[in-house]
Image: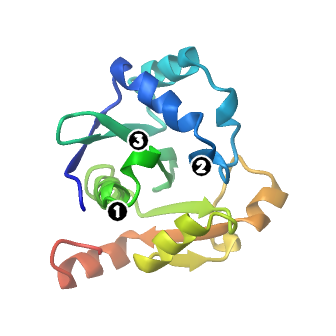
Amino acid sequence: MKTAMHLRRLERKDASLMLEWMHDPSVVEHLHANFLSKTMEDCERFIASSLTDENNLHLAIADDSDVYQGTVSLKDIHGGTAEFAITIRASAMGKGVSRAAMKEIIRIAFEEKKLDSVFWCVSPENKRAVRFYDKNGYVRVPHEQLSIRGYGDDLIRSMLWYLVAKDAWLREKKTVPGGID
């Protein structure tokens, strides 16, 4: 079953459901931040800062009733590139929410932000995420091909890296109805 979704600015009302996924071990077990230690105040601060942050774009993934399902981001926007990130609540998994949100944030990156590429990483132990990215045709690349900032060398080498380049996205968009599937 697929759920309709849209992206919007984060709102204070999203904080409790954001904290829900942060405290769900099944969601955060393979992420490289300590989300289990986050508090409601941390969520509220993050939401407030997202409204004025010019180097990062953090958006709420909301369902057709405007209920927060997760966050999708373009992080460290610089030099024509950004790092993609997405996290959704366990209750939204398996409903097409991630796929739709990812397609939309990549569209925003290329059409609105005028970026040249979007990259991201995933732990090889996060089998669900790796399956999702591979099944949806996202291309793995060696980390040496990317301009990665803010990570230690050991973490960089231990992750799987993916890249979507604008020129490839434009080709896909023209040949596949509805864009990248």
In the picture as drawn, the residue positioned furthest to the top comes out as 41
Q: 114 or 87, which is in the foreground?
A: 87
Is the C-beta separation of discs 2 and 3 under 8 Å?
no
Residue at position x 52%, y 23% from top?
A: 43
* Label 2 crowd bin: few (<14), some (14–19), many (20+), radius 10 Å: few
Q: Nearer the viewer, residue 119 or 6?
A: 6
Residue 37's image quarter?
top right
Q: Residue furthest bottom?
A: 175
Q: Give the left or right position of residue 29, taking residue 175 as reference.
A: right
**What is the three-letter code of the residue carrying label 2?**
Ser
Q: CA distance from mark 3 to mark 1?
A: 12 Å
As drawn, 174 above or below 126: below
Which of the two labelled residues, at mark 3 and mark 1, occupies the earlier sequence position? 3
Judging by the rendered image, the residue that carries numbered circle 3 is 70
Q: Quadrant of residue 98?
A: bottom left
23 up-or-down from 31: above or below: above
* Residue depicted at 43% across the width and 30% down the height: 17
Q: Secondary structure at mark 2?
A: helix
Q: Earlier in the sequence, mark 1 or mark 2?
A: 2
- Give the percent coordinates (x, y) of residue 4: 19, 51
Identified by mark 3, the residue type is Gly
Query: Where in the figure is residue 167, as x and y percent of width and height?
Result: 35, 76
The Cα–Cα distance between marks 1 and 2, rounded to whole angstroms, is 19 Å
Question: In the rendered structure, which amino acid carries the disc numbered 1?
Answer: Arg
SS class, disc 3: strand
Question: Which residue in the protein does label 2 denote?
Answer: 26
The total number of labels drawn is 3
Q: Earlier in the sequence, mark 2 or mark 3?
A: 2
Residue at image x 42%, y 71%?
165
**Residue carrying label 1:** 99
Tag in front: 2 or 3:
2
Dot 3, crowdedness within 10 Å: few (<14), some or many (≥20)?
many
